[in-house]
Every structure is written in structure tokens, then in C-alpha cells.
Amino acid sequence: MTLSSLRARLLAWLLGGIAVVGLCGGLVEYHNALKQADLYFDYHLEQMALLLRDQPVEYLAPLEIPSRAAAYGFVVQVWTIDGQRIWAPPHTVLPNFATIGFSTVKTSEGRWRVYGVASPTRVIQVAQLMRVRRQQALKLAIPTLVPFALAVPILGILVWFAVGHTLLPLKRLAGSVKARRVSALEPLPHAQLPDEVQPLVAALNDLLGRLSAALDRERAFVADASHELRTPLTALHLQLDALARAGSDGERAEAMERLS
């Protein structure tokens, strides 16, 4: 099935359109999921910082960090008002002291989303790597992307069968024409054919009608010519019989003259 085929062209356009729409829809859903994830994790960054603000913190004393902090990849640091870090978990590269509120800090390990909240004696800072946030956002987006991933192949299969079923009358018409005898010039059946095929069938039937009329004229001409040739052929036959019955040279010469 090449692209010169009507079926191939229809399938290429329709399946290509479904793939493009599905891809664009999936990207939009993923983008929306990222936005929702940013709002979701920003909210939890803020709530965790506010929750830890009122805890008593001493130098190197462990904080009571909620369990969801580890699941979300949150990192908690405590700073003095003058910017001295007094508590931090073991980590390769941590963001430095950030401003109060939300900010985005870049380190050698990547970009961090940071929220800081101040108390009279210290600053609580909760941070999250942006790549961890993107991974979490993808997990949140998967439930919304699954319907797209399932709908695109299902729609493709439906389009495949719909195009095949729609073009089936053309296939039947081609088979009917191919199976005809050379002498069969009856009109092609046009019942239950799509409106788009009716002009083609009407043109073929008109052509078959003109061919049938031309063959009828040729048969009439041959019949007339045969009838017109019958009388002189009979006369020639009689002259040949007379020539065969001639007994003398004079009779034979007379018969040859009449035959000539």
C-alpha cells in the first residue's frame, strides 16, 4: 500500500492527525501537571517551614521533621539571624542562606526551590531540588497521561477499520468490473454506493452504453454487407458451374467471357 493509494493517504492524514493531537494533548497535560506540582510542593515547603519554626532548636540538635519530607526530597536547614548555619542534614551541596519567602537557588548539584521563614532568633529554610520536583510531577502526571496513551492507539485502530469499511464499496466495484466478460456491456449496479462514487459509475455506464451501440452498428453493417454480397456471389457460382459444364472450346470461351 503506497501513498498513491487513496486508503494510504486517508490513513496517513488521519493517523498523523491523531498522533499530533495526542502528543500535543499529552504535553499540555504534562505542563499542567508541572504547574500543579509547583503549587503543591510550594505549599508543602511553606507549611513545613512554618511547622518547624516553633520547634525548639539547639546547636546540632535533631529536628522533628515530618516523614513526608524525605518522600518529597525536602532538605531542612536552620540559620541564625546573622546568617550562621546551626543545623543541616548531611548533604553534598546545599543551597546557601536565601531570602525570606520563596526563591530559586542554583548550586553545582542543580537548581533548588527554597522557602525561608524567620522567627525572632533563627531562620528555618526548607529546600527541594527541582529535578526531584520534576520527577514527582511526572509521577503525578502519569494518571492523566495514561488515558491519552490508551486513547491514541484505540482511535488509530478505529480509524483503520473505518477507512477500510468506507472504501469497501470501491473495492467491490473494482472486483465486479474485473470479473466481467469482454462481451458483458450491461450497466454497472449503482445501488448502495456512496454519493462520491455515483458520478464515476454513471460515466462508466455511459461509456458501456456507447460501446454497446457501436458494436450493434458494426453487427448491422456486417449483416447488411453479407446480404448485399449474397447476389453477386450466387451469380459467380452459376457462371463457374456453366464453365465447368462447357463441352467445347467455343462454349468454354463464351462462359469465360460471361464470367469475366
Image (tube, rainbow, N blue to C red):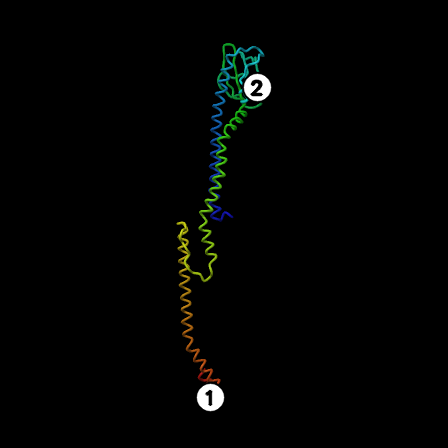
Crowding near pointer 1: few (<14 within 10 Å), some, many (20+)? Answer: some
Q: Where is residue 27 in the image (x, y as percent from the top left)?
A: 48, 32
Residue beneath disc 2: 94
Crowding near pointer 2: few (<14 within 10 Å), some, many (20+)? Answer: many
Q: What residue type is labelled 2?
A: Leu
Q: Where is residue 42 in the image (x, y as percent from the top left)?
A: 49, 21
Q: Where is residue 106 in the image (x, y as percent from the top left)?
A: 54, 22
Relative vertical location of residue 180 with respect to residue 219 in this rendering, above or below? above
- Residue, far front: 192
Dot 2 falls on a residue whose secondary structure is loop
Give me the residue at 44% from left, 61% from top: 184
Relative vertical location of residue 199 with respect to residue 234 in this rendering, above or below? above
Along the line of sight, which residue is nearer the eye, 247 or 157? 157
* Dot label at residue 144: none
Relative vertical location of residue 243 with respect to residue 206 in this rendering, above or below? below
Viewer-nearest of labels 1 and 2? 1
Q: Where is residue 134 in the image (x, y as percent from the top left)?
A: 52, 26
Residue beneath disc 1: 251
- Tell me if label 1 and label 2 are in contact, CB under 8 Å: no
Distance from Cα at disc 1 to Cα at disc 2 = 140 Å
Along the line of sight, which residue is nearer the eye, 250 or 69? 69
Q: Which amino acid does label 1 sit on?
A: Glu
Q: Earlier in the sequence, mark 1 or mark 2?
A: 2
Q: What is the quadrant of the C terminus in the image?
A: bottom left
Give me the residue at 40% from left, 53% from top: 191
